[in-house]
Image (cartoon, helix red, strand yellow):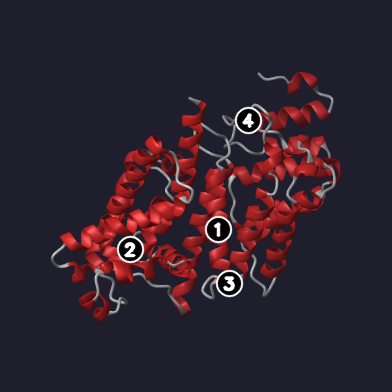
Amino acid sequence: MQQNTELQLSIEHLFRHESGKMLSVLVKLFGLPQVEVAEDIVQETLLAALETWKLRGMPEQPRAWLYRTAKNKTIDFLRRERNFRSNIAPNLAGEATRNSPPEQWLDAFFLETEIEDAQLRMMFACCHPAIPAESQLVLMLRTLCGLSVRELAVAFLLPEETIAKRLYRAKEKIRQENLSLEVPSGAELSPRLDAVLQAVYLLFNEGYKSASEASVIRRDLCEEALRLGDLLCRHPAGDLPKTHALQALMCFHTSRFDARLDAAGDIILLEKQDRSRWNRALITLGYEHLNRSAVGGEICEYHIEAAIASYHASAPKFEETNWKSIFYCYDLLQKINPSPFVALNRAIALGYASGARAGIEALLQIRELDAHPVYHVALGDFYAQNEEPDLAKPS
């Protein structure tokens, strides 16, 4: 039983990492309006792997097995499809499709450089301005990152039916407008890049504070977000300060993963974590990206959140954390993008920087989180520190 469970987890981990890559390659081949054809081939490939590997075990090179199977299923589709040339992406050389069998030229689509290019194009295509803004993130996170409708519903605090409708509207718009894969340039780049970065950010958050009932941390999602962020940082279209700021933020948070859970799989609070288990290589990488994000005068939310994470990463002990700087960052973030949760973190930082009474007074000004347990835990903690045990007790 345990062996089957481990196999299932290994398969799910691999599928999460590879399904978006396969889909991107196939969409590059068939064209964006044929995204459902590509989705069907990916789904058939994953089902074939699941059935075969449960009987025979995982092959030595499971990733290569998936891509070989996807290629074979694509060949089968092209042979069945009489008018397949009209379904091929325009950038494919016409002579190759007319004079060569597909098994001879399809390999070029599955080269690592082509896979990365296809994924990058797919990221920007999902955020095309013709697609409704509320559908862009849903489409990207569903098709490229493999989040389920349920996971998306939790991430966006929306009913599953609403998420399903957004996906449908996005695909209808792609068909109606006959949209193509492209990485925009000039004035078109910035708004699409913002949407892409937000999708990567949401993907990381879903992994870091998972909505899954099986795990409070989804490392596979966080690793995928880091990989996509790295792709963006290395491409001229994404090599911008805000991209590096987001990558820095994700590196700092990921560095704490090994210290975040106890043996039972429960969350260990920041002040109780064994900091010797933090990944110093990722922290160093985080600082490299943070330095690259400092070019120019732009300051966005990712810059501020990365700065906050960097102060935690640099503190040898929880008691030595630079809470005054963290409070300043949350104060700035509240001005840029006010929300009850930013106000909560600002109040907590103030309490650690200026004393429990200051934290209590700031928390009492927040009305929107009265039903949220974290709010009452923070308030109770400060009451206890301020030697007001009666008020610290849950009411």
Image disc number at residue 111: none
Instruction: Tell me the crowding category of disc 1: few under 14, some 14 to 19, or many 20 or more residues within 10 angstroms, Cα based.
Output: some
Q: Which residue is mark 4?
A: 265
Q: Which residue is mark 3?
A: 239
**x and y percentages locating residue 312 in the rendered image:** 76, 49
Q: Are marks 1 and 4 in contact (CB under 8 Å)?
A: no
Residue 213 visible in this rendered orientation of the protein: no
Residue type at mark 3 is Asp
Left or right: residue 204 versus residue 289 is left
Please report the residue visible at 72 percent of the width from the left and 19 percent of the height from the top.
393
Q: Label 2 vs label 3: CA separation? A: 24 Å
Q: Earlier in the sequence, mark 1 or mark 4?
A: 1
Helix, strand or loop for disc 2: helix
Q: Which residue is mark 1?
A: 227
Helix, strand or loop for disc 4: loop
Q: Which residue is mark 2?
A: 27
Q: Quadrant of the C terminus?
A: top right
Residue 307 visible in this rendered orientation of the protein: yes
Please report the residue visible at 52 percent of the width from the left and 47 percent of the height from the top.
221
Please report the residue visible at 73 percent of the width from the left and 39 percent of the height from the top.
270
Q: From the viewer's perspective, is the residue at label 1 or at label 3 nearer?
A: 1
Instruction: Tell me the crowding category of disc 4: few under 14, some 14 to 19, or many 20 or more residues within 10 angstroms, Cα based.
Output: few
Residue type at mark 4 is Gly
Residue type at mark 2 is Val
**x and y percentages locating residue 60 in the rendered image:** 49, 48
Q: Label 1 vs label 4: CA separation? A: 25 Å
Q: From the viewer's perspective, is the residue at label 4 or at label 3 nearer?
A: 4
Q: Earlier in the sequence, mark 2 or mark 3?
A: 2
Helix, strand or loop for disc 1: helix
Which image quadrant for residue 388? top right
Q: Label 2 vs label 1: CA separation? A: 20 Å
